[in-house]
Amino acid sequence: MPRTGRDRLLEALEGLEALGVSVLLLGLPWSEAMKSLGLALAAAGLLARLAVGGRMALAPKWTLLCLGFYFCAAVLSQMLAPEDLFRPRELLTVGMTIAAFPLVADVCGRRPSRRVLLAFVIIAGAGVGAVLGYFEYMAGPYQRLVLPSIENAIPAGEYLAAVMALAMGGLFAEAGATVVGPLLGFCAGACALVLLMTKSRGPFLGAAAGGLLIGALSLRRRWIVLAVSLALVAGVMLFGSFNPESRVVRDGVVRSSSVVKRMQAWEASMDHFAERPILGHGVGSFSLLGIHAVDEWGVEWQQNAHNVILHSLVETGLLGTGALVCFLVLGLRDVVRALRRRGWRHHRAITAGSLAGVAVLLVSGVFSVSIDAEPGMLLFALLALGASVDPQSAAPEKANDD
């Protein structure tokens, strides 16, 4: 049948949405303007396409339903929040963060080949952000490196560690490629170098977990993963023996200042959760609760709970946290199911890298809030990217062995 004007319009709007998502993911770590522009273009393309009768390629319905229920719980938490904690603009922040999931799911679901494009866009964006952050750090009096649009070293480290895991997945599959291999290697190396300069220990642990996971998923010789694990443990022990005056070595992990502050924040968070256990104090309200930690350096007001689950419990209660946990569990299930489908090497590499990137952010979330702001948008994007599969890509090709 000949194509009609409506067909051409739908195709153009679909392309606009894909362009917006690409701009968003490319500029996420280094350009606030690109992030806003990309999100606006993607949303405009999607809404216009729906307005003229187009359809979305939805993610698995139960996963999407849990995400929708989480947003509804966030809305209810704000509507019923105490007057001094009422901040309805926080709902826009939550909506912008979780929008990455349905947008990426729709773009990849309608044309699965685009998942390759989006994966490389994420990696390239992090590489650009790492280089820009490095030059800014070297030119200024900074003690810890941050990224141009992620001004806190901890979420900057989380973002870099997650993208590094994604890039490693691609590198295992494309290491021998003439152009793609070196580019992936450069981006992964730049992320690793800049991650070290953030001096963020939570993202270090996440990066180790993600790196070991991508190795286990990509290498047939899994003894290599075991060897790397032992090497990491030996490296930590050597660092401790050669740096006895280091704060962590001197005070011990449990007695270190950062751990003491987190323990105090966790205890205070549980107390505030007990006050409003069903819907919490309102999304975005944690920094207004006056929670503080005290150590030998003085008093430090806590902007978050330093733990994803506790933070969510305080702000959205059992309803919001339950929905969030269900979404994460179902999202991970979707990615694992996609990983089990024997497809082309680069599709499997993207799925494995996405799973490892999500693991990085969830491990980091034990010690910080890794589902907020740019790392959060990346988390939702990776869950959608990893779960999307090309039904036409099934082939007997094996994953990279070495």
Image (cartoon, rainbow, N blue to C red):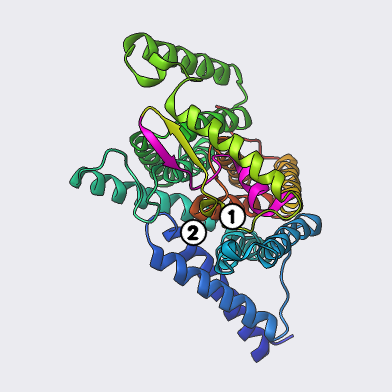
Tell me the quarter of the image containing the N terminus.
Answer: bottom right
- Decide: is 227 above or below 185: above
Q: Disc 1 vs disc 2: Cβ atoms closer than 8 Å?
A: yes
Residue 312 belongs to the span the image colors magenta = yes
Badge 2 amino acid: Leu
* Quarter residue 398 falls in: top right
Tell me the residue that label 1 is attached to.
381
Tell me the residue that label 2 is attached to.
25
As measured in the structure, the alpha-carbon distance from the residue carrying label 1 to the one carrying label 2 is: 9 Å
Badge 1 amino acid: Ala
- Decide: is 315 above or below 187: below
Horizontally, residue 382 falls left or right of residue 199, namely: right
Q: Disc number at residue 308?
A: none
Q: Is residue 209 visible?
A: yes
Span shown in magenta: 297-317
Q: Residues within 10 Å of mark 2 (few under 14, many from 20)?
A: many
Q: Give the residue displayed 69% in from the left and 55% down from the top.
A: 390
In this view of the protein, which residue sits in the foreground, 176 or 357?
A: 357
- Decide: is 168 above or below 127: above
* Quarter residue 332 falls in: top right
Disc with the residue nearer the chain's start (1 vs 2): 2
Horizontally, residue 396 falls left or right of residue 194, namely: right
Q: Give the residue displayed 57% in from the left and 57% down from the top.
A: 284
